[in-house]
Image: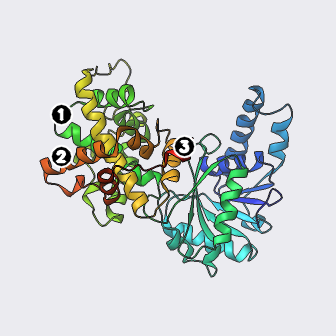
Amino acid sequence: MLDKQSIIGVVGAGTMGRGIAQVAAQAGHRVVLRDLDPAAVESARIQLEKVLARLEEKGRLAAGEARSVLGRIELSGDLDALSPCEMVVEAVVEQIDLKKSVFQELEEICSEQAVLASNTSSLSIAAISSACAKPERVIGLHFFNPAPLLPLVEVVPGIGTDLEITESCRSMMGAWGKTPVIAKDTPGFIVNRVARPFYGEALRIFEEGIADPATIDWAMRELGGFRMGPFELMDLIGHDINYEVSCSVFEAFYYDPRFKPSFTQKRLVEAGRLGRKTGRGVYDYREGAVKPSPNTNRDKGEKILIRILAMLINEAADAVFMNVATANDVDLAMTCGVNYPKGLLAWADELGPACIFETLRSLQEEYGEDRYRPNPLLRRIALSGARFHDPKERR
């Protein structure tokens, strides 16, 4: 199976593709980075040279190591260059038909033993693998951007993926210095599923007039310890992208009200106020604009925090309940993938599952909406006085 001598291929020389190539090359692999666009290939070469030189200057690579890492990366526009690869990671745009086409081509070029992986963040591995005659060798390896810096990789076996390939890929990601978590092939995998309430419930609180965006962001940053508040983060990601993901997850879960998108965000997209990249989003980033001041009333802020946190924890509990991932992997995914200050289920144990359950039960009673229904696992744990994590495991 896969080891340090395995030749790694990467299809797509954009930000993610070249980042994955860099990670593999720094781990000692010979890498073939392929893109159909000659301009993308040249841009990847220039960016890799800059990044690796900077790492060497900062002492994060030994003297002369940048040249060695670059020497292990072959850039090509020829798909046939991938033929000797034992594993190929596809990192093209999120279009199912394009990905299927790439996998069909890879299956014709690569050996029957080669592992074919997709870096998709949202598409079904089962759907992608359906294009292949040997779907058992297809798997998801979802890196997070920027790939060289963020440790998490969601390892996503499809419905027919060989168990040995899953374990081999998990082991390989660990050897690359990554934190691998196994996720079931369900919409959003772990991170993009569990994180939806961070945005959705913040928007709902704003829509109800309970607090303005600056106050909600302050509560989540200063009281919750998140690096960015939800509105700041949506402005950074881009409301077009964030809203599209929300709609995609909502549709994929058969319109479950837990994932219902926001009209407020829809209007921002329609108005072209996409965030930092357009100069205006929730906040105004144009020259001379003044960011609004939050209401720093702590009693009010704690109510905002616990409401959003309860929704996040409920989603994390649902991921465990539906066997998407283990409690440990869910917490690892949220801390390593999106820099949450604590694992959500560990956070629930700290606050007391009964507190989270009661918060959701009260919201459901107040609004009469299925959006706030407590997950059966959360209910069970709260009513039994148990915990999501065994305290012995955390010693």
Quadrant including the C terminus:
top right
Q: Residues within 10 Å of mark 2 (few under 14, many from 20)?
A: some
Q: Position of residue 32 (x, y in %)?
A: 76, 57
Residue 297's x, y, as percent?
24, 21
Identify the residue at horizontal 46%, vertical 38% (top origin): 342
The residue most toward the bottom is 133
Which element type, helix, strand or loop, lies under badge 3?
Answer: helix
Of residues 153 and 20, the one nearer the viewer is 153
Residue at left 47%, top 55%? Answer: 190
Q: Earlier in the sequence, mark 2 or mark 1?
A: 1
Q: Residue at x 48, y 53 (%)?
A: 327
For marks 2 and 3 on the same chain, the one whose residue lies earlier in the sequence: 2
The disc labelled 3 sits on which kind of residue? Arg
Q: Which residue is mark 2?
A: 362
**With 363 as the anchor, is 235 left or right in this view?**
right
Q: Which residue is mark 1?
A: 210
Residue 394 - label: 3
| Image vertical order of residue 361 relative to residue 6, above or below | above
Left or right: 37 as drawn, with respect to 263: right
Q: Quadrant of residue 348?
A: top left
Q: Amino acid at mark 2?
A: Ser
Q: Please, what secondary structure does the residue beneath circle 1 have?
A: loop
The amino acid at mark 1 is Ile
